[in-house]
Image (cartoon, grey):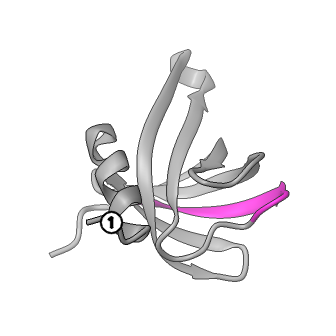
Amino acid sequence: MSAKRFKTKENAKLEVYGHIGNSEAKMRNLSATGAFLEVNHGNYVPKKGDLLNLTVELNSLKRVYNVAAEVIWSNGLGLGICFIHKDDILERMMAKAGVF
């Protein structure tokens, strides 16, 4: 069963762990478990399996959210991401590198 999605047009900044630089995106929908993003520009378009640091500034609430996420699918400039616990980033990066 999937989580309820809410449409949005928030700006987001993406930093991909293991890549230099960042990208800017528009968050198109949001749920409790993830989001759909469209990359506007940047020096790297995230791919399936990439781990992200996502920053979203909600101007209407005067709040900034910073969360960890994994790209679960990508199609051109569109990305489906699922949120993950920040404590899991190092373990997932090491698993991808074949350390475990």
User: Quick check: 82 above or below 2?
Assistant: above
* Residue 40 part of the magenta-drawn span: yes
Query: How busy is the neighbourhood of tag 1: few (under 14 within 10 Å), some, or many (20 plus)?
Result: few
* Residue 39 part of the magenta-drawn span: yes
Q: Residue at x 57, y 70 (%)?
A: 79
Residue 41: image location, x then y, percent: 85, 57
Residue 95: image location, x then y, percent: 33, 66
Q: Quadrant of residue 87?
A: top left
User: Quick check: 61 above or below 54?
Assistant: above
**Secondary element at image label 1:** helix
Q: Is residue 90 left or right of residue 40?
A: left
Q: Residue at x 48, y 32 (%)?
A: 66
* Residue 21 in view: yes
Query: What residue is disc 1 on?
Result: 95
Residue lying at the far left of the rendered structure? 1
Residue 31: image location, x then y, percent: 34, 55
Q: Is residue 80 left or right of residue 75?
A: left
User: Quick check: 69 above or below 60?
Assistant: below
Indicate the quadrant containing the N terminus: top left, top right, bottom left or bottom right: bottom left
* Residue 10 in view: no
Q: Amino acid at mark 1?
A: Ala
Residue lying at the far bottom of the rendered structure? 75
Region in magenta? 35-44
Indicate the quadrant containing the C terminus: top left, top right, bottom left or bottom right: bottom left
Residue lying at the far front of the rendered structure? 99
Residue 99: image location, x then y, percent: 34, 64
Q: Residue at x 64, y 67 (%)?
A: 46
Count of all numbered marks drawn on residues in the image: 1
